[in-house]
Image (cartoon, coloured by chain):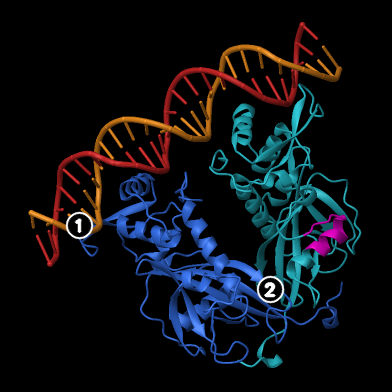
Chain colours: A cyan, B blue, C orange, D red
Amino acid sequence: MPYDPSDFPPFAVTVDLVVLTVRRHALCALTVRRGEEPYRGQWALPGGFVRVEEDLVTAAARELAEETGLGTQDPGSTQAGVHLEQLATYGEPGRDPRMRVVSVAHLVLAPDLPAPTAGGDAGGARWTPVARLLEGLDEQATERLAFDHARILADGVERARSKIEYSSLAAAFCPAEFTVGELRRVYEAVWGVALDPRNFHRKVTGTPGFLVPVGGTTTRQGGRPAQLFRAGGATLLNPPMLRPEV
Amino acid sequence: MPYDPSDFPPFAVTVDLVVLTVRRHALCALTVRRGEEPYRGQWALPGGFVRVEEDLVTAAARELAEETGLGTQDPGSTQAGVHLEQLATYGEPGRDPRMRVVSVAHLVLAPDLPAPTAGGDAGGARWTPVARLLEGLDEQATERLAFDHARILADGVERARSKIEYSSLAAAFCPAEFTVGELRRVYEAVWGVALDPRNFHRKVTGTPGFLVPVGGTTTRQGGRPAQLFRAGGATLLNPPMLRPEV
DNA sequence: TTAATAGTGTCTGTAAGACACTATCTA
DNA sequence: TAGATAGTGTCTTACAGACACTATTAA
């Protein structure tokens, strides 16, 4: 099959970002307000075109930096808590009414950040609890996301929920140094359940290499001072943390 | 951002297929021989261009049918044992020396099939043990796959290996009706380990909804007649099957 | 008979779930 | 003091891993 340009139809390739964080005990996603048709004025996931010379994950990191100022280095990196990975690709013919767009969605897990600065071409950006964005996914909810972004968001949330079961990825939602209680509240927010603090403590501190004590303590959560940890080298949690009510 | 064609660079979008099966106690992948440059004469994963009006998973199913005669219905379907799902997308600028190609890889799990019929434009097709295709992934192995297909295959194999831990997907490698021993040999081939037959039997028959007895028996594996089962409705295995030596 | 696979039962160690109890901070 | 969170210990139960033993076929 020689690569005659007439052989293949032209596609636009974009990256869309599911940027998740935990704010006030709720899992939140970054949304931007659309400035043009279609879906003008509606909220959407941040994203943009992939450039000619650019790798997919590089494009995702660039869009993330433009939208939030967040920096990542390599795919899978957990520098400063920020994690970026490819999620899935969406290419249904009618998903964009104007032309054929294939979007490679990426998942970003970030610690709680200051209110997003809409640095890019977006008309506004904010954190929205995913529960509100995903309620009544089938019907026309009031806060319905543009395009098929509700489905993309749902896939990203499900990926995050399942990945923290067997990996140390939940630490990506925490600052560089965090307490066991703060990590537990991340699990509770992402899964939407309550976990037993004692059993959780035993599980995460008993897994070798999962948490590394940094030496200090903090009382920023109130109560007795808690030890500070950072994420250890062990990225796999075996046996996994069990998600209740599955 | 108005969709002026000059705004975005032209991409070709293809689907590549990681088709896995278990033959003679070995995990094998479907490979086709390339008829043109680059990589002429080398083995590669089957694949092809996505058509204008075609969904990504539809394109993957079409390529699969053209290449093997295998039929699937919906994504995630387990009809006649065949399973098809999206794997990941590969779009590094230099991955195809001729032009910018973004490939959406898909993973197919199929029962043991007759020798593949190279029905498509491929110069030949065969099953190759993945162990041989992946050995010395970094160096220039003798049986090196074209493009970045060795990495795509490695990602597909890893996906299959991890998914059978917590799902009933291993049944996709079996015929519609199978015995507990045949299912165990699938796990052993995919993971490359030996499992205790007694503990395996207890695990899979003790999980409600995982296996459904069909009533008959078979002696096609030799020895005492074994009950025949089909995959049950329970697609999630909780607690998961533990992969040894991880 | 032997050799193969199928299937049941039993023991042991690990770990999860439930929860009592103590420790140390702020208000 | 009360009330919050941190952290340890204990008991029970579930289940994986190891393995003895029986069952039923083919050669």
Q: How many marks?
A: 2
User: Looking at the picture, how far across and down is residue D20, in whole percent?
Assistant: 23, 39
Q: Residue at x 83, y 64 (%)?
A: A62
Q: Secondary structure at mark 1?
A: loop
Label 1: how many Cα within 10 Å (few below 14, some 14–19, many 20+): few
Residue at mark 2: A94
Relative horizontal placement of residue A4, taking residue B238 as reference (left or right): right
* In this view, B161 is above or below B39: above
* In this view, A238 is above or below A85: above
Q: Compare residues B230 and B238 and report the one nearer the observer.
A: B238
Relative horizontal placement of residue B27, taking residue B201 as reference (left or right): right
Residue at mark 1: B225
> Distance of mark 1 from mark 2, alpha carbons?
53 Å
User: Looking at the picture, how far across and down is residue B86, in whole percent?
Assistant: 58, 67
What kind of residue is marked 1?
Answer: Pro
Relative horizontal placement of residue A244, taking residue A77 as reference (left or right): left
To which chain does the residue with label 1 belong?
B
